């Protein structure tokens, strides 16, 4: 006898990164950007439309059989990830319950790229706020998808991180004019650029001017997955931030916990 499954069973299910036996939802401190240091519950979307060569969450997209190069390819024993072992599918209701299990008024929706699942995350936000109306929501995005009006209205802070050439991505994929224009028009959007070398600054200046990003909401953050690398890069980046009048962002979680997941 064959069993028929109604398609509605799968409707509205979202793809989250997997940590241990459940979704990657964990209580920590925000490590980057304008709210660095704030206690927050993170929820990590699986899947991304970009494939940055230095991505530190490549378990959300760098799956076996995919052609994308990654700097970890040179690490002995490194293997591309198994999608089934790194994905949890669940309803927004279940995700909201998991977030509410933590006594924390700030949630950071990260990825991967969360804006690939806008209606599902909007559902999560609404359901959490039914129980805890004052919950603050941040969304971390690569800035390549236009946020839907309902999501834009519901999110307290967008941490937009437009990618530079150092990501290995072509400009046509990483810089989407209509998406960057939409974020530039949102007063709660901040723009964080990941910088690897001094020459990256010329590109940041060009991108900021081209897309009219607000100068008082720009942050520069050193790329690095160790405190040593961050220290080396922050030394010259701090000087450039002073000259340009932009903020410097550290990566607090890397200093506190290294390149580990779920903290
Ligand atoms: S956009 Fe973000 S999550 Fe996606 S590949 Fe780049 S760094 Fe990783």
Image: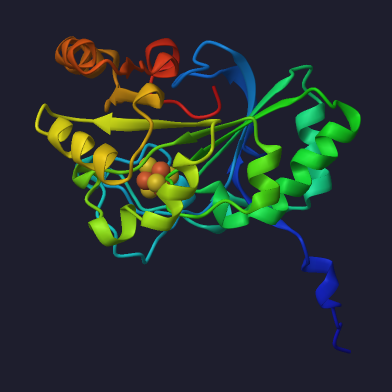
Question: Which residue is outermost to the left?
Answer: 199
Is 251 in front, or is 69? 251
Question: Residue at the spot x=21%, y=18% of the render?
Answer: 244
Tell me if 1 is positioned left or right of 86 in this view.
Answer: right
Residue 98, relative to residue 232: is it above or below?
Answer: below
Is 257 in front, or is 122? 122
Quarter placement of the C terminus: top right
Q: Coloured how?
A: rainbow
Q: How many marks?
A: 0
Question: Which residue is outermost to the bottom?
Answer: 1
Is 122 in front, or is 27? 122
Residue 175, relative to residue 102: is it above or below?
Answer: below
Q: Is residue 112 visible?
A: no
Tell me if 47 is positioned left or right of 120 in this view.
Answer: left
Q: Position of residue 3 (x, y in %)?
A: 86, 82
Q: Is residue 158 visible?
A: yes
The quadrant of the rendered image in which ligand 1 is seen is: top left
Quarter placement of the N terminus: bottom right
Tell me if 245 is positioned left or right of 253 in this view.
Answer: left
Q: Position of residue 77 (x, y in %)?
A: 29, 43
Question: Residue at the spot x=32%, y=16% of the render?
Answer: 248
Q: Quadrant of residue 69?
A: bottom left
Residue 24, relative to residue 147: is it above or below?
Answer: above
Q: Position of residue 220 (x, y in %)?
A: 30, 24
Q: Position of residue 52 (x, y in %)?
A: 31, 48
Question: Residue at the spot x=34%, y=26% of the render?
Answer: 215
Question: Residue at the spot x=32%, y=53% of the render?
Answer: 174
Residue 246, relative to residue 119: is it above or below?
Answer: above
């Amino acid at each position: 006898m064959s069993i028929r499954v109604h398609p509605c069973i799968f409707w509205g299910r979202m793809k989250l990164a997997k940590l241990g036996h459940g979704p990657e939802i964990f209580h920590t401190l925000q490590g980057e950007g304008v709210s660095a240091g704030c206690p927050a519950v993170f929820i990590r979307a699986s899947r991304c439309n970009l494939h940055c060569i230095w991505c530190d969450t490549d378990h959300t997209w760098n799956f076996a059989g995919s052609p994308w190069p990654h700097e970890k390819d040179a690490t002995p024993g490194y293997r591309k990830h198994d999608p089934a072992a790194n994905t949890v599918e669940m309803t927004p209701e279940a995700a909201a319950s998991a977030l509410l299990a933590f006594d924390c008024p700030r949630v950071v929706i990260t990825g991967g790229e969360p804006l690939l699942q806008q209606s599902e995350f909007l559902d999560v936000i609404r359901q959490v706020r039914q129980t805890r109306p004052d919950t603050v929501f941040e969304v971390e995005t690569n800035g390549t998808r236009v946020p839907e009006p309902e999501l834009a209205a519901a999110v307290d802070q967008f941490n937009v991180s437009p990618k530079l050439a150092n990501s290995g991505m072509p400009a046509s994929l990483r810089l989407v004019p209509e998406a960057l224009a939409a974020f530039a028009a949102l007063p709660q959007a901040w723009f964080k650029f990941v910088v690897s070398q001094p020459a990256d600054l010329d590109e940041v200046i060009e991108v900021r001017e081209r897309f009219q990003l607000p100068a008082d909401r720009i942050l520069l953050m050193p790329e690095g997955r160790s405190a040593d690398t961050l220290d080396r890069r922050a030394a010259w980046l701090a000087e450039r931030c002073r000259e340009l009048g932009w903020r410097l962002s550290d990566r607090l979680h890397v200093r506190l916990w290294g390149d580990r997941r779920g903290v």
